[in-house]
Amino acid sequence: MKLDFSRITQQQNVYYLTPEDPSFSKHYLAIREKENRVLSDTEVRKLPYLPKDEWPYRIKSTERFLTHVAKKKHPQHILTIGCGNGWFSNKIAEVSTENQVVGLDVNREELEQAARIFKKKNLHFVYADIFKISKKCETLFDIITLNGAIQYFQDFEGLLSLLKTFLTENGEIHIIDSPFYKMEEIAAAKERTKNYYTELGVPEMTPHYHHHDEKTVRDFEVWYAYKKNIIHKILGKKDSPFSWYVFKS
């Protein structure tokens, strides 16, 4: 079973499962512009192999995940949550044309950029409030990813409970390049975030950015654990400063 895209409303090659709510994307894009991190189509096509911002640190984590997907013996239905401009969804779709990949977000502008740049028969970009489409996605996906996206979900434990219902038998949830904190670190992290957005002139973004206790992934396996390595620092090697967490149903 899979989503029947012929029955879903489409605009600019983006499929809408729920009505658009621009409240988050308005502030998110304002921050990206302030940070000079709104990427051109040419730059997005190069991701993650872009020598600026955090991208050199995301190459290894991307390649590790793609290697995992490539080892799958059967076609996979894969959901990428918080897909943004679609670069990661596209990389997954390139692994095998047999896999079906759905990139989901609530940022219309980035989704339209993704749909404009990455055109593949096995790749679809969807606008949806994830909490309002549970009936459409039950037991639908073999793999679900959250890549650099968990901080935009307030109720992370509620999200995980929902995503577990989206999984097929032996399905997997992968959390990649995402920050978790020790409980005693959260208050200070929240204050840093508030000060950062205020200094950039978009304090409205503060309520949209959340800091999650590392205990929320206690049921996950750790497939990569970041460790500070002085040799890597000397040699200039770069890798993700975040661990790779995997839940298997």
Image (cartoon, helix red, strand yellow):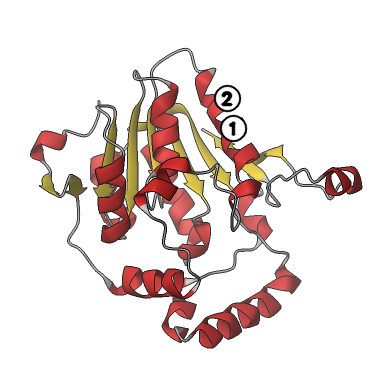
Q: Residue drawn at (45%, 23%), measured in percent from left and top?
A: 95
Query: Which quadrant would residue 202 be assigned to in this image?
Result: bottom left
Whole-percent x, y for residue 244 in the image: 64, 42
Q: Name the residue under label 1.
A: 63
Alpha-carbon neighbours of circle 2 within 10 Å: few (<14), some, or many (≥20)?
few
**Disc 1 to disc 2, C-alpha distance:** 6 Å
Q: Residue drawn at (49%, 47%), measured in percent from left and top?
A: 146
Whole-percent x, y for residue 198 in the image: 52, 87
Type of amino acid at the residue the image marks with label 1: Glu
Whole-percent x, y for residue 126 in the image: 26, 47
Residue pushed farthest top?
A: 73
Compare residues 184 and 20 and report the one nearer the observer. 20
Q: Name the residue under label 2.
A: 67
Does residue 171 lie above or below 48 as drawn?
Answer: above
Q: Residue drawn at (39%, 75%), measured in percent from left and top?
A: 30
The secondary structure type at the circle numbered 1 is helix
Report the side of 2 relative to 186 (left or right): left
Whole-percent x, y for residue 74 in the image: 42, 14
Type of amino acid at the residue the image marks with label 2: Thr
Q: Can residue 139 be seen in this view?
A: no
Does residue 40 lie above or below 181 as drawn?
Answer: above
Alpha-carbon neighbours of circle 1 within 10 Å: few (<14), some, or many (≥20)?
few
The secondary structure type at the circle numbered 2 is helix
Q: Can residue 105 be seen in this view?
A: yes
Q: In which quadrant of the rendered image does the N terminus lie?
A: top left
Report the side of 216 relative to 46 (left or right): right
Mark 1 touching mark 2, by CB under 8 A?
yes
Q: Residue drawn at (59%, 85%), measured in percent from left and top?
A: 195
